[in-house]
Image (cartoon, coloured by chain):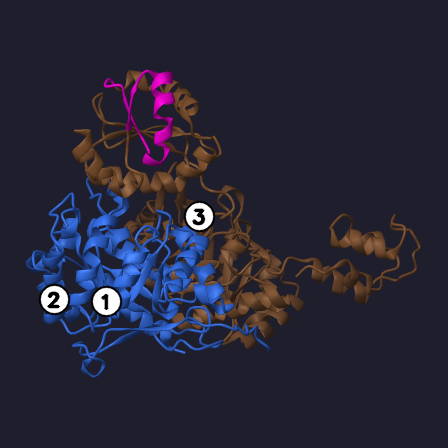
Amino acid sequence: MEHVIEKWPGNVYELTIGATKEDGGTRSRKVKAGGINTLPFLHFEGLTPNQPLIAMEVWDIEPSEWPENLKNEFNEVLNNAAQWAKKCEDLGADLICLRLLSADPDGKNASATEVARTVKDVLSATSIPLMILGCGNNEKDSSIIMDISQIAKGENCLIGMAVKENFKTFTAAAQAGGHSLIAETPLDINLEKQLNILISDMGFGSDRIVIHPSTGGVGYGFEYCYTIIERTRLASLSNDKMMSQPIITFVGQETWKIKECKADETEKPEWGSLKERGVLWEIATASGYLQAGSDILVMNHPKAVNEIKNHINKLMEK
Amino acid sequence: MALSGLDIYKHLPKTNCKKCGCPTCLAFAMALAAKKTSLDKCPDITEAAKQILDSASLPPMATITIGEGAKKVEIGGETVMFRHEKTFYHPTAIAISVSDNETNIQEKIEKIKKLHFDRVGMMVGVDLIALKNDSNDTDKFAAVAKELTDKSELPLILLSDNPQTIEESLKNISQKRPLVYCANSKNFEQMSRIAKQYNVPLCICGKDIEELAELSQKITALAVKDIVLDCSTRAVSKCIQNFTKIRRLALKKNFRPLGFPVIAFAENVTEASAYICKYANILITTLDKPEEILPLITLRLNIYTDPQKPIMMEPKLYAVGTPNENSPFMVTTNFSLTYFTVTPEIENSKIPVWLLVCDAEGMSVLTAWAADKFNAEIIDTWMKKTDVANKVKHKKIIIPGYVSVMSGKLEELTGWQVLVGPKEAAAIPKYLKTIWK
């Protein structure tokens, strides 16, 4: 029987994150994302040189909005980003996703120097590659990203979020510090490509970009993101070089804020155990995005991370 | 795969006899391709040509019905590999497995009944019960099958490769059209005879895709039409690849023997989620707790949403939390994604809010505003329709930041004070906590 094998002309750029001593950094290992030349896990058709990566979220402030059963997993380290990051490394994360939320002007309004120190502390406490995100306020993020980039120079981090409003500063910062860049767009495949072009036009390697097409939790816009990821991946396989970057999804962030992961058994008895529900929701969301083609998943709950890592290993079996 | 007019023309008698009502055979071929006429209008078509054309006009993947009446389940009939190419039609049917050794069937049925949830006004839940023959006892299996049929509305899947066990159970319940699982290379002749005699769909199990195709052809030759496919492996990587291969052969090559729905088995949410995405038509699972099934049902709803038709929320005044007459009053559009982005953020703020969802034909805030479907007049109309004035005393409206330009007009129309809220939903908690108070 002759199976239908697609002959895709393109593939996804392979991106290395992290730098070891030989590369001028201090990480004990590097990780690679992308490189695939077929649809997710279709080993009969093409090569998947790198399996999808799991990053674990670390905040530099206490995540007050997190539900108790997620917070409890990190209780002793929630007020110390460096220890928190070390814990994630021990839990088996491929890389750390450090969010510098203390910089938020409406919150602590930490200065560039303060957050840069946190980055340094996290780098010293861990040996796995690092992803660094600002606080989400475009203006503030633009004002701190250069210091962040400099303090982590040589470590080949993944920094973000570059958006339409601040991509010039972010691109310059990533360029100066030798880092890769996450480009984020609001659920629109055309804007996604356009931002990649704008960033590349500044002389930044299009193979140093990671696409964040926006993430929706299951039940909260998941289908839009799922389809944009599938379409992006099909475009990369058709050799559209401005859509051939690895794709990142923020699974944990979009899971733990929804009602289904917060409402307890007294409020919603028909939804079953809250403790299990949140973890399973994160797992279902992650599993779905893996099938769409997400190359990096940013996750929160250790149980969900563990389960998805095992699942990825099984999916990688030929 | 549909044939073009010219493809069809090659198989016609080319006599231009006009008996079909068309002036020429080519015109008839074109009408056939456009599905405006039927092949039986041609009196001179050869049997060979008829077979080719008939099979080409069948959908590439058959739609199979399990059960009967209101709770019957349709699966298959899919036409695309990716939902954005058109849509997926028949959501993965979820079957909860039950052992015939189960001591309290009634309790189990009650448990399964609870696996139904209200999702934005729609009841969604599991579809089938899969009865396993763990006892290896024919009478016991038949008795439990009968009890499940009597006490539950959900159609059944009968899991046993013993033809005698299957036939014994079907004697009582065949009119409910359960799916029989399974026929294999050893028992397919007997199973086919039973499936045909009792008119029930039959799942076939092959050790690989090749054997599956072979069995499918043999069973079709024995006049069984309603077929479901199982490629026997339970390793998730192999399954996903096999489902993709089968679906591609069916949809892209119009390969008849594999043009049927496929069945998957999952013991955990992780693999069940993968199968819902790629491309299980039936999912049999041992999972039976609400916290396990709710994420799966929700994921299924997402994947099987028609991407060309945005889900719209019912336009009305929503109480997020338990607001009172002093609670903030916010307006937005009835695009489901807008609603699902805004509501969790309001919930996060822990401040109860009256949220007026206006009918903007399912468009997001900016799109609706640009299309003039979300303007001061429309908000004013919906405020009147939903009688907001009797529920909110402070006479302040919070509008999305992107439509701040309508403030003046809206104040003029309503006489209420308009406050411009944040542009992005993520900023709502901060807005409510700082600016509102």
| Quadrant of the rendering where the C terminus of chain A is positioned | bottom left
Residue that numbered label 3 is attached to:
B154
Residue A308, image x and y in percent? 29, 66
In the picture, the disc for residue A120 is 2
The subunit letter for the residue under badge 1 reads A
Q: The blue chain is which one?
A: A
Instruction: Name the foreground residue: A188 vs B176.
Output: A188
Marks 3 and 1 close (CB-CB < 8 Å): no
Callout 3 crowding tier (Cα within 10 Å): few <14, some 14–19, many ≥20: many
In the rendered structure, which amino acid carries the disc numbered 2?
Lys
The image quarter in which residue B216 lies? bottom right
The subunit letter for the residue under badge 3 reads B
The image quarter in which residue A85 lies? bottom left
Q: Which residue lies furthest to the bottom in this view?
A: A22
Choose the circle earlier in sequence order: 1 or 2: 2
Callout 1 crowding tier (Cα within 10 Å): few <14, some 14–19, many ≥20: some
Q: Judging from the image, what secondary structure is the residue with disc 2 in?
A: helix
Q: Is residue A246 visible?
A: yes
Q: Based on the picture, tell me whether residue B390 belongs to the magenta stretch.
A: no
Q: Can residue B272 be seen in this view?
A: no
In the picture, the disc for residue B88 is none
User: Horizontally, is B50 left or right of A1 in the view?
Assistant: right
The image quarter in which residue A96 lies? bottom left
In the rendered structure, which amino acid carries the disc numbered 3?
Leu
> The magenta stretch spans which residues?
B393-419
Residue that numbered label 1 is attached to:
A306
Q: The brown chain is which one?
A: B
